[in-house]
Amino acid sequence: MKDKIMDLIKELAYLEEPYILETLTSIFESKKELFMADTTITLPEKYTSFWFVLRNVYSDLATWQQLASEQQKNASLQLEISSLSEQLKHIKSQINHVNEEQLQRKRYFTTISRALFEDYNAYLLSQNPLIATMVPTTSQQQQHVLNNYLKILQDQINKLIFDTARLHLGTLILKRKELSIRLKQLHVIVTDSFADAPLIYEKLKELNHRLVNLKEGIDKAQQELAENISTNDIRQEIKNKTQLIEKAKAELLSIEVKIDRHELSPDIKTMLTSDYAMADDKENFIAESQNSLSWSSSLFNLHSWYSWGTDTEYKAKLSRSHAEFYFLQLLHQQEELNTYIQQLTKQLVSTQDLLGTSSSTTKPSIDLALLQQHTLQLLKEYNPDYKPDEVTNVSLLTAIINTIGPLSKCIDETEESLHLLVQLMQIDSAILELRTTNTLTDETDALMPKPEELSQLRITEVTRQQEIERLQEKIKVCTASSSNLATMIELTNKHELLRKEKGELDTKLKQKKAKQPQAANRNSLETKIEQIKHSIQLQIIHLDTELKALATKSEDPLISEQTVNKQVTKLMDYQNNLHTWNCLIGNNIEHFSNQLLNWYQQLFITLQMHVTDEISYYQACQLLRDIYFEVEASKKSKDFTVLANYQTLCPTPQTTWQCLTSLKPGFPLLQEGNKLTDVQNPVLETHLKGLYQQQQLLRKDYPREGQLLLQAIYNLHQGCLLYEMNPKHPALTSLLCSLEDPRYEILHSHRGFHKVFEWIAKLCSFLIDLIKHPQEKSNSRQFFFFKPTKTIQLLQDATMELGKHAKPLEVSPT
């Protein structure tokens, strides 16, 4: 155990200042078995004091840990209070902001809502002059009125917007019909379905692309053919065309003669000629006439069989029908020849026009047969019914020239149709958007206004738009008012929630602040921690110093273990009692200055190290009790004069501590109320009774002096009893000089007429010191005219009487 204590002291001595709580705690935790309650202390006497000091350090560490924990708890509490205060500040700021916004919105709402409520009441009166109107006051009433008025305004504006939508819809439908008519003129049929136009557009776009490509091919073929045609070729073609025309005219003349000489009557001829001319499809007309005649002559026609048997003129009728059909055939041949002659004539004119542009010789060209074949394909692509009488360069070129005009016209019509289709699709899109936007679910024809209604809608369009704008402005104001009112209601609810939250925070903050220690207590914690740290520092330094001093001393002779245990047990009791007094003093040392605190801590450590017997223990207890008494009596005034005098007498406790303990009697402390046995010596008993009586008188008006006198009487009484038991007891030595203790200085002060003598004595002492400049100040109580107080006189008389009889041994109190 001795080695462990030595190691612990050395380990502590190696630490650097300032000491860290965690480091010290870790070191002592590793040696905590030394300080357990059930630990048996087996140490030589000179090492026991080291263990006591280490135990004090161990105890101080626990206190330091507790104070640090409490300090941390206070810091956490302060953080919580700061957080709550910040939250409360934020809540108050929000409440102020909400209040300000409420006032602003209320002023705004009051300004704009008054006119709305008046308009609403005016509308109600216009609908029912006998209705009772009111101005809403509560938020619920105001919201209800605004919602109703907003619904009325929406209905009014929706009706106007519906009329405008019908006007726009009617205008678009009429425009669409115009486009449809124009497209129909261009042979493009568009229905009322919105799906037709995009499909037709794509087909026309494809057709236009083909026609443009076809025209480019025909233009190229025309150029190539023109380059490969000579004047002779053209003249030969003109000659051929002329011969064909003459031949066709001859055939036409023959047919005309047959028509004129036909056996039918002029009326029938005129009728048949008229019927033929009116037929749109003359080929189909001739085919139908032939089919009708064939059926009338058919053996499968029962009606014909019946007519043959019953109608005697049926044969004549059938013969006339054949004659009429033959006449129609002649008319058709005449029509075909006329058309053929016109085409030949047109081709002849076109061929004749080529004479001015052709050369007498042809240019080298590509394969003419291939060119003619390609040109023929192009012409048939444009007109599948194209069948030339002969294929020559001139005839093909003439056909191309006659084709370019109609082809260009067809392209122009296709492009115009595409442009019109784009406009029509845009109108369809506008109609669809108009129907969707205005929820026009009825059929288009049902939504189409009548002509007179459409005209009226056009006339009232400007007025209607102005009314829509006016209603839109009212709806905007009404919506803003409703939104503002809803926000005001939300702000009211928010204000209530914030108010409740503020109340909860106030309650929490008050609870936290109630737990928060006062600033003095917080400072006291910090002071106590610093004091403990300083005390630990002093104790470690003292341990290291004493350990080094001990190393130079010789070892004590060996003693029995039983004797060691008894000594340790007794010393442990001494140290425990000293520690108790130190704790009492420690609770009040926050009033000490740093210098006084440092002095006291060194004094206590020194007392711990040097209390080795009963007399030194009693003297140490007397000293600590007296220090505690002075602290308690002077903590309010903070006038620690007695302690300052102690510090003067014992400036370095490590070496001068006996200057204080020698002033203290080596007697146990007695509690007030404890009664000692009577002294047998009548003279001493008489002195003691006088002192007890004086104490009773003094404590009534001067409690501190009375208590101080009682402590002195107890010591004197115990000294008398000890004298009767052992006149040579060494403890009597310190008793005889105890009146020199500075704590009894207050008992020397007069409180009456004799105060004058005290002042005179102090003045004389001051003058003598001023003149002679002695090393030590003179005692003012040594002058002949100075008279001591009754209390001091009684104490001196009793002490002197005891000193006459007592012959104590000259033994050092240590």
Image: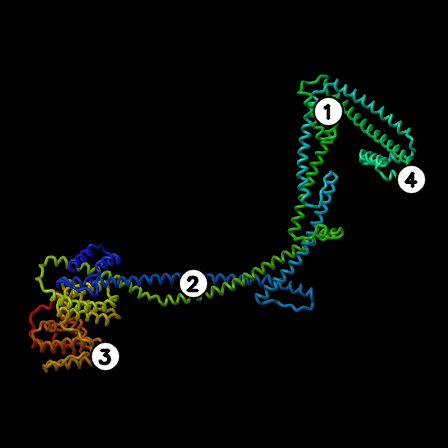
**Dot 4: few (<14), some (14–19), or many (≥20) neighbours within 10 Å?**
few
In the foreground, 203 or 291? 291
Estimate the spatial distance between the alpha carbons at disc 2 and disc 3, rounded to whole Å. 55 Å
Which residue is located at x 69 percent, y 67 percent? 129
**Rendered location of residue 767, percent (x, y):** 15, 69
Please tell me which of labels 1 and 4 falls first in the chain.
4
In the foreground, 484 or 780? 484
As helix, strand or loop, the secondary structure at mark 4 comes to: helix
**Dot 1: few (<14), some (14–19), or many (≥20) neighbours within 10 Å?**
many
Compared with residue 673, is residue 531 higher up or lower down, i.e. above or below? above
Estimate the spatial distance between the alpha carbons at disc 3 and disc 1, rounded to whole Å. 157 Å
**Dot 2: few (<14), some (14–19), or many (≥20) neighbours within 10 Å?**
many
Amino acid type of the residue that numbered disc 4 sits on in the rendered structure: Thr
As helix, strand or loop, the secondary structure at mark 2 comes to: helix
- Please name the residue that numbered disc 3 is placed on: 701
- Please name the residue that numbered disc 4 is placed on: 310
**Rendered location of residue 643, percent (x, y):** 20, 68
Amino acid type of the residue that numbered disc 3 sits on in the rendered structure: Asp
Please tell me which of labels 4 and 3 falls first in the chain.
4
Does residue 685 appear left or right of residue 587 in this picture? left
- Mark nearer the viewer, 2 or 4: 4
Please tell me which of labels 3 and 1 falls first in the chain.
1
- Please name the residue that numbered disc 1 is placed on: 396
Residue 785 showing in the rendered view: no
- Please name the residue that numbered disc 2 is placed on: 88
Please tell me which of labels 2 and 3 falls first in the chain.
2
Please tell me which of labels 2 and 4 falls first in the chain.
2
Q: Quadrant of residue 657?
A: bottom left
- Mark nearer the viewer, 3 or 1: 1
